[in-house]
């Protein structure tokens, strides 16, 4: 009996030590990710538009790059399972590649090479997500995952807001300063990789199927999971096809606003990221306690009204209010998006379920910007805001029958 008690205490201490090591590594990851996030949201498109005078296809591909990585994450997870490498190793490797790509993008004078390296870099930045979610599932207590995850996320959005302001000020002084800005982004990607590789993790389990997209079967076999994914696809598409249009709407001449670098950074990064920073603890506490489906419905409505306000006017104050609502929605959406599969996935299947969710996000995020640029030229910015709001409202109403499943125990 004394021996068994001692073993339990030792196991508990090991779990606590693993949780704390993961948390410390994730704090560093969160800080570096904040800088990379501001690059994806603001600087890559801004430089493509203002410095290289990129066309719509190039702009759409740059905006879609993070989502291409999400789509390809399922393929990466499948082939990574045959290597017997640790999850942290596979989580870090794509970030090392991101760093190298951003170093090249920093100093090229060619639009083609700039676009290709930025696209490749941000594809890799997103492809690692399922590995990180598996580490969270393994190392964080189920009833405290959102609490642990929210603190590095808080650091991410705070750093994103700060780096968005500093970076835009640097570009306002001289747009050629983007060379040094993108060099710094590359260094942050390397730092993020080092933070991930420091997290304790197990080796990846062998895939149970030969098809790299075999995990998609879970969206069919688990009907509740699949139904939530369907509603999320509709809502997410309505959100993501406006993502690059927000930058274009306040930057490109045809919409009549033509905001400065400071104004673009305020609307696209600083205001929404500040709102995220303020509200993440609130949404994290709700995620650990509240019916997930009801929480998702509330977040959908925040997104819907935010996008509606953003595009229905050229008034900077109303656009700012819409941006603030989008930021409030992203505060909860970031937590829900990263952790909701832990409530639905059976033990040992978190990575597989997450790869389905991430890949579907990648599909809508890849085709969304292309469809968004095509549609906005047909119906105008105001109408795309109204249409997006209607799609989000519809997706929210679809979730009503799913409320009874909102307390699934998960893994």
Image (cartoon, rainbow, N blue to C red):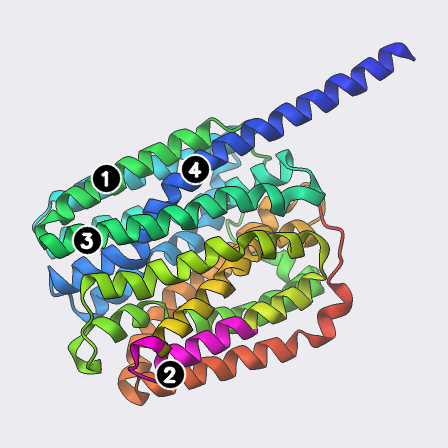
Position of 2 with respect to 236 (left or right) is right
Label 3 crowd bin: few (<14), some (14–19), many (20+), radius 10 Å: some
Q: Which element carries disc 2, helix, strand or loop?
A: helix
Estimate the x, y position of residue 316 in percent, counting from the top left. 30, 76
User: The magenta stretch spans which residues?
Assistant: 301-317
Q: Which element carries disc 4, helix, strand or loop?
A: helix
Q: Earlier in the sequence, mark 2 or mark 1?
A: 1
Estimate the x, y position of residue 328 in percent, counting from the top left. 49, 64
Residue displayed at 49% across by 47% down: 153
Q: Which disc number belongs to residue 100?
A: none
Residue annotated with mark 1: 184
In the image, residue 346 above or below residue 317: above
Q: Which disc number belongs to residue 384?
A: 2
Residue annotated with mark 3: 169
Q: Which callout, 4 or 3, points to the residue nearer the camera?
A: 3
Q: CA distance from mark 2 to mark 1?
A: 35 Å
Q: Which disc number belongs to residue 29?
A: 4
Q: Which callout, 2 or 1, points to the residue nearer the camera?
A: 1
Q: Nearer the viewer, residue 20 or 375?
A: 20
Residue displayed at 73% across by 69% down: 403
Q: CA distance from mark 1 to mark 4?
A: 15 Å
Q: Nearer the viewer, residue 33 or 208?
A: 33
């Amino acid at each position: 009996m004394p021996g068994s008690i001692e073993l339990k205490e030792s196991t508990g201490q090991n779990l606590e030590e693993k949780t704390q090591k993961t948390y410390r590594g994730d704090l560093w990851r969160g800080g570096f990710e904040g800088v990379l996030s501001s690059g994806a949201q603001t600087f890559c498109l801004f430089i493509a538009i203002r410095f290289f005078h990129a066309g719509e296809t190039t702009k759409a591909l740059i905006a879609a790059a993070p989502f291409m990585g999400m789509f390809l994450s399922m393929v990466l997870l499948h082939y990574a399972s045959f290597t017997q490498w640790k999850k942290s190793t596979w989580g870090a490797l794509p970030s090392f590649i991101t760093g190298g790509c951003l170093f090249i993008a920093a100093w090229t004078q060619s639009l083609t090479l700039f676009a290709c390296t930025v696209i490749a870099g941000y594809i890799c930045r997103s492809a690692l997500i399922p590995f990180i979610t598996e580490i969270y599932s393994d190392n964080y207590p189920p009833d405290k995952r959102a609490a642990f995850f929210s603190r590095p996320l808080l650091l991410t959005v705070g750093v994103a807001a700060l780096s968005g302001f500093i970076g835009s000020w640097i570009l306002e002084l001289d747009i050629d300063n983007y060379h040094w800005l993108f060099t710094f982004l590359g260094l942050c990607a390397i730092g993020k990789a080092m933070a991930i590789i420091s997290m304790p993790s197990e080796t990846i389990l062998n895939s149970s199927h030969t098809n790299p997209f075999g995990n998609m079967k879970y969206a069919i076999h688990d009907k509740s999971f699949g139904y939530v994914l369907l509603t999320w696809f509709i809502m997410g598409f309505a959100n993501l096809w406006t993502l690059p249009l927000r930058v274009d709407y306040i930057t490109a001449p045809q919409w009549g606003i033509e905001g400065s670098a400071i104004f673009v950074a305020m609307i696209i990064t600083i205001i929404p990221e500040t709102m995220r920073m303020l509200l993440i603890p609130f949404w994290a506490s709700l995620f650990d306690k509240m019916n997930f489906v009801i929480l998702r419905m509330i977040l959908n409505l925040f997104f819907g009204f935010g996008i509606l306000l953003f595009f229905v006017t050229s008034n900077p104050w109303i656009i700012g209010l819409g941006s603030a609502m989008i930021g409030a929605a992203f505060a909860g959406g970031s937590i829900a998006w990263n952790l909701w599969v832990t409530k639905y996935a059976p033990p040992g299947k978190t990575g597989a379920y997450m790869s389905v969710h991430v890949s579907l996000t990648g599909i809508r995020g890849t085709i969304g910007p292309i469809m968004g640029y095509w549609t906005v030229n047909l119906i105008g910015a105001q109408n795309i805001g109204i249409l997006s709001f209607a799609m989000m409202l519809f997706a929210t109403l679809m979730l009503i029958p799913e409320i009874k499943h909102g307390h699934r125990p998960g893994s």
